């Protein structure tokens, strides 16, 4: 659990009038795909009412450049929000992701998982903050950002944060930056798997936790596999 901050320091943010709305008991499941040629209209804010369930997934294929900023306002009890993403970058791609997860009501949950594969001279920036208001007792909120550098020139900057003003919460954040495991590659190559295929299998395994969250029948896993094999 993060440090409990004195309630007197809490400054509520204004809820914007223009936002993606998840009404009471509503279920929202949306996937946003950046494919280098087009960028979907991603909401700047999401407002979540009581008993609602929201799942948003962000997919970036090589050739994409984007600056994504998202404020999530969980203002009704017993609601749940899941954000996830896979960002496959090559060349001079540049993606910035800024997420504020605001827990304004009690008994709510949220989960964030963003995985990045950065090659070439690409850059990925992640700024994520979980904010639990004094009214957000019994909150459970988790945030994870995992990144793999595939070249010496690729760059990743990740900054997960907690800002907690309630006493009874379960919150955590974590971030990793690393490279493909050479021992795993050696093992697969010793079993007759070519190096390129071994690397591809490692990368597919790395992004699989996010792919598992996609709706069934989606063509996105196939598109990601094709993109990964071209890195």
Image (cartoon, helix red, strand yellow):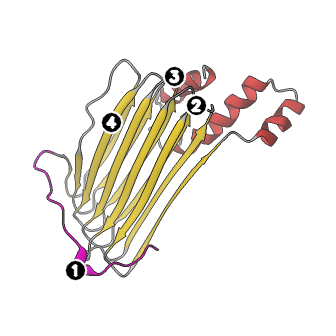
- Please give the residue where the numbered disc 2 appears in the rendered image: 153
SS at mark 1?
Answer: helix
N-terminal-most mark, 2 or 3: 3
Asked if the magenta segment contains residue 9, the reply would be yes
Give how far across and how far down residue 208 sits, in percent: 58, 41
Is residue 41 left or right of 181 when viewed as pictured?
A: left
Residue found 53% across the figure and 30% down from its top: 221
Task: Of the two numbered discs 1 and 3 on the same chain, state the one appearing first in sequence.
Answer: 1
- For the residues labelled 2 and 1, say whether their Cβ atoms are less than 8 Å apart: no
Q: Which residue is mark 4?
A: 67
> Which tag is nearer the camera, tag 4 or tag 2?
2
Residue 193 forms part of the magenta stretch: no
Residue 32: assigned label: none
- CA gap between label 4 and label 1 equals 33 Å
Q: Earlier in the sequence, mark 2 or mark 1?
A: 1
Callout 4 secondary element: strand
Q: CA distance from mark 2 to mark 3?
A: 10 Å
- Label 3 sits on a secondary structure element that is loop
């Amino acid at each position: 659990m993060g440090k409990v901050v004195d309630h007197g320091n809490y400054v509520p943010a204004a809820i914007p009038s223009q936002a993606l709305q998840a009404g009471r008991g509503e279920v929202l499941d949306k996937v946003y795909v950046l494919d280098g040629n087009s960028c979907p209209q991603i909401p700047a804010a999401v407002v979540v009412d009581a008993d609602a369930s929201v799942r948003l997934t962000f997919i970036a294929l090589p050739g994409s450049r984007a600056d994504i900023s998202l404020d999530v306002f969980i203002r009704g009890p017993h609601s749940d929000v899941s954000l996830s993403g896979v960002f496959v970058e090559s060349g001079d791609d540049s993606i910035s992701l800024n997420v504020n997860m605001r827990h304004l009501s009690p008994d709510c949950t949220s989960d964030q998982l963003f995985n990045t594969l950065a090659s070439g001279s690409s850059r990925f920036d992640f700024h994520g903050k979980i904010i639990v208001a004094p009214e957000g007792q019994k909150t459970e909120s988790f945030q994870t950002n995992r990144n793999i550098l595939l070249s010496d020139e690729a760059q990743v900057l990740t900054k997960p944060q907690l800002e907690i003003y309630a006493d009874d919460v379960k919150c955590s954040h974590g971030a990793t930056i690393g490279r493909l495991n050479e021992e795993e590659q050696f093992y697969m190559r010793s079993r007759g798997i070519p190096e390129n295929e071994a690397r591809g299998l490692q990368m597919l395994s790395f992004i699989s936790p996010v792919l598992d969250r996609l709706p069934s029948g989606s063509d996105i896993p196939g598109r990601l596999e094709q993109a990964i094999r071209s890195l």
